[in-house]
Image (cartoon, grey):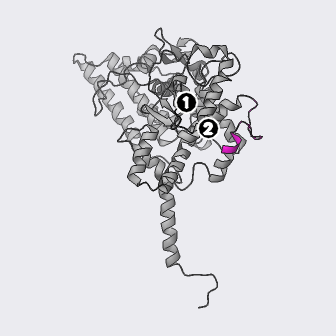
């Protein structure tokens, strides 16, 4: 077998208009497959997969295409190692056999993405070693991915095969060979759809809704060690910047993309209501990062405390101002050392600093965990203030930037709902279970 994986990477490039796009490359620079990358950065809604809302001509967001890129890298490396050229297969009116589909299905289940290995120049979430191991190892020697990840990988294969079919065979005049090709294509669709539809039943991981994402004791410990002056702070430099970033994530519940996008011009230093604006500016020409910051939610404003706003302004006027490169852009948070000094901070840098704080107090930590914790605290404080459930949900949707029909509020409410159910159950049990504390009978 040819170990293709070690030569295939996902890289982020920028076009002449400053727009970033991912490419699956081979040997550092060459596109692994022209069809693969044309599909990756094109419109993914083929005439064969019209959704309920119809076909859109808009390409997916950069973050979505990066996710697709790793799914495509996986299937490209897998089939190349098997000696199967998907483009030639489809062009020759042949598709994957039952055995070939089943083998790919098994490989897709065996390993998880390593999201912590991403960086600004080559976002690598599935290492080459894991690709090869997953292909050849048994299910018993590797943990399985979630049902969602497994399903998305199969959907990507189906969608890419559909794309190749459209390129080579769609909308041609009917001939005997064309009819045979269409029949083979439909057989492939039906067979892989069986695995896709059945994937929802494969999740064996059960989340305990009663368990807080960060326990109260650990949360207070975290609030202590992020302080610049804390003796437990794990950083030797950039302490003020790191404290502010952590406090923004903890105090507002915003996503990392919102922190990365934050500009000095977005700061509103009102005496009574200090806040910052969370904007949606796709393809921001001033963002020179290979992975530009993206805000997934609606545009809104996030309130912060007066003390936090003072820290932000202090950071901007002192630390940030001391870096000459920082004067070339308006983004608040910058890299403070190395060749990128003065440039906007990256996704990878924030993920690493959050993870390092987690290591310092013995709890695995990532930015989205802080978003979950903010929602727990928000629910508790809102209930203490006397707000009704419907009001709390409306306020939460605004704070999180969700659309009106979003179901995410229910996800974040699971912890509080579990607590309430436990309290009611305990009261009922105390009435129905006889006392065993030594009372005389």
* Image quadrant assignment for residue 314: top right
Check the picture and name the quadrant holding the N terminus.
top right
Q: Horizontal and vertical percent for residue 75?
A: 49, 27
Question: Can see residue 159?
Answer: yes
Q: Quadrant of the C terminus?
A: bottom right
For disc 2, the marked residue is: 307
Prevailing secondary structure class for the magenta stretch in the rendered image = loop
Residue 232 lies within the magenta run = yes
Frontmost of labels 1 and 2 is 2
* Disc ID at residue 259: 1
Nearer the N terminus, badge 1 or badge 2?
A: 1
Residue 153 placement (x, y as % from top left) = 46, 33
Q: Nearest the camera: 193 or 15?
A: 15
Q: Is residue 309 above or below residue 82?
A: below
Residue at image location 58% in from the left, 36% down from the top: 248
Q: Quadrant of residue 337?
A: top right
Specify whether residue 117 is in view.
Answer: no
Please tell me whether residue 403 is drawn above or below residue 11 in the rendered image: below
Asked if the magenta segment contains residue 20, the reply would be: no
Closer to the camera, 235 or 358?
235
In front: 164, or 223?
223
Which stretch appears magenta? 223-236
- Element type where label 2 sits in the image: helix
Q: Position of residue 318 (x, y in %)?
A: 68, 23
Residue at position x 25%, y 18% from top? 171
Determine the residue located farthest toward the bottom in the rendered image. 441
Q: Residue at x 48, y 33 (%)?
A: 104
Q: State the image quarter where residue 434 is shown.
A: bottom right
For label 1, count other residues whose C-alpha is less than 10 Å away and answer few (under 14), some (14-19) or many (20+). Answer: many
């Amino acid at each position: 077998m040819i170990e293709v994986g070690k030569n295939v990477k996902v890289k982020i490039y920028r076009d002449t208009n400053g727009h970033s796009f991912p490419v699956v490359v081979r040997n550092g620079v060459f596109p692994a497959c022209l069809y693969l990358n044309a599909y990756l950065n094109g419109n993914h809604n083929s005439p064969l997969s019209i959704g309920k809302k119809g076909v859109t001509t808009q390409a997916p967001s950069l973050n979505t295409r990066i996710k697709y890129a790793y799914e495509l890298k996986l299937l490209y490396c897998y089939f190349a190692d098997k000696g199967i050229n998907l483009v030639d297969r489809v062009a020759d009116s042949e598709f994957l056999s039952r055995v070939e589909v089943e083998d790919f299905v098994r490989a897709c289940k065996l390993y998880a993405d390593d999201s912590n290995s991403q960086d600004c120049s080559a976002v690598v979430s599935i290492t080459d070693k894991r690709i090869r191991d997953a292909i050849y190892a048994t299910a018993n020697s590797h943990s399985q991915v979630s049902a969602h990840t497994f399903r998305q990988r199969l959907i990507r294969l189906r969608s890419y095969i559909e794309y190749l079919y459209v390129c080579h065979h769609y909308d041609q005049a009917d001939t005997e060979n064309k009819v045979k090709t269409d029949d083979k294509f439909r057989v492939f669709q039906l067979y892989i759809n069986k695995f896709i539809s059945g994937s929802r039943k494969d999740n064996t991981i059960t989340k305990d809704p009663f368990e807080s994402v960060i326990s109260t004791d650990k949360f207070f410990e975290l609030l202590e060690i992020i302080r610049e002056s804390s003796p437990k702070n794990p950083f030797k430099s950039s302490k003020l910047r790191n404290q502010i970033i952590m406090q923004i994530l903890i105090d507002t519940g915003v996503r990392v993309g919102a922190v990365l996008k934050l500009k000095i011009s977005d700061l509103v230093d009102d005496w009574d209501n200090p806040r910052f604006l969370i904007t949606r500016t796709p393809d921001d020409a001033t963002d020179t990062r290979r992975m530009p910051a993206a805000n997934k939610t609606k545009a809104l404003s996030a309130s912060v405390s007066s003390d936090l706003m003072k820290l932000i302004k202090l950071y901007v006027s002192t630390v940030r101002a001391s870096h000459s490169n920082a004067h070339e852009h308006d983004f608040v948070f910058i890299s403070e050392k190395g060749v990128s000094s003065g440039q906007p901070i990256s996704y990878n840098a924030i993920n690493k600093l959050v993870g390092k704080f987690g290591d310092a107090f013995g709890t695995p930590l990532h930015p989205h965990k802080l978003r979950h914790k903010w929602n727990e605290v928000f629910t508790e404080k809102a209930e203490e203030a006397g707000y009704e459930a419907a009001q709390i949900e409306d306020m939460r949707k605004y704070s999180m930037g969700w659309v009106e029909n979003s179901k995410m509020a229910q996800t974040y409410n699971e912890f509080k709902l579990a607590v309430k159910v436990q309290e009611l159950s305990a009261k009922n049990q105390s009435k129905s279970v006889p006392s065993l504390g030594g009372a005389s009978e």
